Image: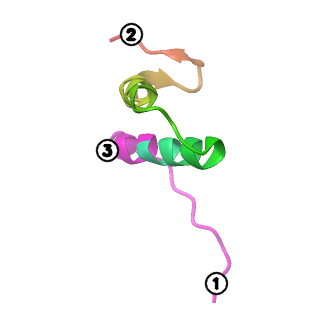
Amino acid sequence: MDDTMKVEKADIEDIDSLVELRLDYLIEDNGSIDKNDAEIIREALPDYDVSARKLLPT
């Protein structure tokens, strides 16, 4: 079995999957997330510019 890791850059089409992965991580790390908090995260993360650490203008 090959133990190498394949790394690819995400594209705009991957945003929904990345947001859900982030929520999965937060749930795993915290035990649970309030439904309202999860919805806020789902709405805010797609507009977050990680390189600038700020929300993008909409």
Residue at (48, 48) in percent of width and height: 21
Circle 2 sits in a helix, a strand or a loop, which is it? Answer: loop
- The picture quadrant where one finds residue 43 is top left
Range of the magenta residues?
A: 1-19
Please provide percent x and percent y for residue 49. Answer: 51, 23
Outermost bottom residue: 1
Amino acid marked by disc 2:
Pro
Outermost top residue: 57
Please provide percent x and percent y for residue 13. Answer: 31, 44
Residue at (59, 25) in percent of width and height: 51
Q: Residues within 10 Å of mark 2 (few under 14, many from 20)?
A: few
Q: Residues within 10 Å of mark 3 (few under 14, many from 20)?
A: few
Q: In the rendered structure, are the residues bearing label 3 and label 2 in contact, judged by CB atoms less than 8 Å apart?
A: no
Camera-side residue: 38 or 1?
Answer: 38
Number of the label disc, if any, that sits on residue 2: 1
Drawn side of residue 44 relative to residue 13, left or right: right
